[in-house]
Image: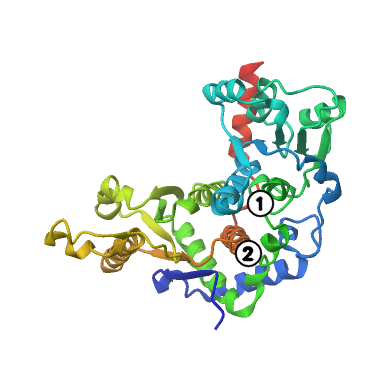
Amino acid sequence: MKKQNILHKNYFKKKYSNKNFYSKYFNNIFNEIKKNCDVSQNTYHVLSKKFSFKFKLQDLKKFNKFEKIVLIGMGGSILGSKAIYSFLKKKIKKKVIFFDNLDKDKLNNFKSKNNKENCLFIVISKSGNTIETISNFIDLKILKNNAKNIIIISEKNENILYSIAKKYNLFFIEHKKYLGGRYSVLSEVGVVPSYFMGINIKNLRINLQKYFGNKEKSFLKQSSISLSQIIKKNFYKNLIFLNYSPKLEEFLFWCQQLIAESLGKKGKGLLPTISNSPKDHHSVLQLYLDGPKDKIFYLFSENVRKSNKIKTNIITKKLDYLNNKDLDDIKIAQKNAIKKVLIKNKIPFREFKINSFDEKTLGELFSYFILETSISGRLVNINPFNQPAVEQVKIFTKKLLS
């Protein structure tokens, strides 16, 4: 039997999934996605085998000489690349630096310790007008005519980044207008940085339609309907990611944005929180389990075992329960203890176990959460592709700076 890349199981109450109306509604949405996936100009096209990039690999090869990559972006323009880097770090030989916030000390430290001529700078913003991205780009003082170490990715219109690319004759890659930032990781936004990291792009995209299959569709359907009902009832306010695998942390930050920006609308939504475990067992677990009953939990762990045995028999017999155990054994025991408590207290949760840290698995994870999140939103008449409240903040920020 072929080993699955991801093992998943829901521990939700049946009342969240036994909805005939939503079952029919899901089927209509799913069939529409499957039918129109190969049609460009829609978000789901990024999952299509017919998806084409706005660049040629031959044109990127001239940038391979750079051993250090600097990514400048915000939100969906950079979170996916951070997830890829963290998930596949063992395969990546080049050093990658991320500027994804306004951090003056980090910028100054970089400028003082690095020869900028030896770095490849990739600047990404869908709108081409993201204030933080442009500010970091300019503050790095790398801009000059015909610079051979800068790549700009933005929409191709009269935005600031595209105007800069034309004025200074910089290498430019078009960001597709129909792809929102948080859904763009499998497009140029995530694939261009992945190429320079040495990631196998073909394998990253090979499993994107896995959940179109009947067996996998069943889990997607059950999960999307359950999540939509939880959001609709508005009883649970918080979604806690209990993470037992450090390599998954940046992927979960990508999930956090995807879920928060897509589903946090019309007074509804879940607040996603990444809680690294077992560390957080000793800080916030008391609140999680005995505080307000307004939380659901996603448990993430890895099924990849390492040999790192602890020898305690030479110290004291009181530690016999730890003797010849490795750190993974301890984490798994703690995770399974949490599961028992959640089940006992009838707290809804789900579990994801990662069997393999490779490109195929990561692509499958990206695809699954894109599908589940967007479908869940549509099931409760929430537009999962816009972000109207965020746009208001952007407008006020520019007015205050003017």
Foreground residue among 31 and 20:
31
Residue 59: image quadrant is top right
Crowdedness near tag 1: few (<14), some (14–19) or many (≥20) residues, C-alpha within 10 Å: many
- Residue at image position (73%, 23%) is 142
Percent position (x, y) of residue 84?
Answer: 60, 51
Relative to 47, is 274 above or below? Answer: above
The mark tally for this picture is: 2
Foreground residue among 216 and 236:
216
Side of 168 relative to 348 (left or right): right
Query: Which mark is on residue 248?
Result: none
User: Which quarter of the figure is the N terminus placed in?
Assistant: bottom right
Mark 1 lies on a secondary structure that is helix
- Residue at image position (81%, 52%) is 53
Percent position (x, y) of residue 125?
Answer: 70, 37
Relative to 333, is 112 above or below? Answer: above
Foreground residue among 228 and 121:
121
Side of 359 relative to 350 (left or right): right
Side of 102 relative to 307 (left or right): right
Crowdedness near tag 2: few (<14), some (14–19) or many (≥20) residues, C-alpha within 10 Å: some
- Residue at image position (48%, 58%) is 232
Report which residue position mark 2 lands on.
360
Amino acid under label 1?
Tyr
Mark 2 lies on a secondary structure that is helix
Report which residue position mark 1 lands on.
183
Percent position (x, y) of residue 350?
Answer: 42, 65
For the question of whether residue 56 can be seen, the reply is no
Amino acid under label 2?
Lys
Q: Earlier in the sequence, mark 1 or mark 2?
A: 1
Percent position (x, y) of residue 327?
Answer: 33, 58
Furthest-front residue in this view: 314
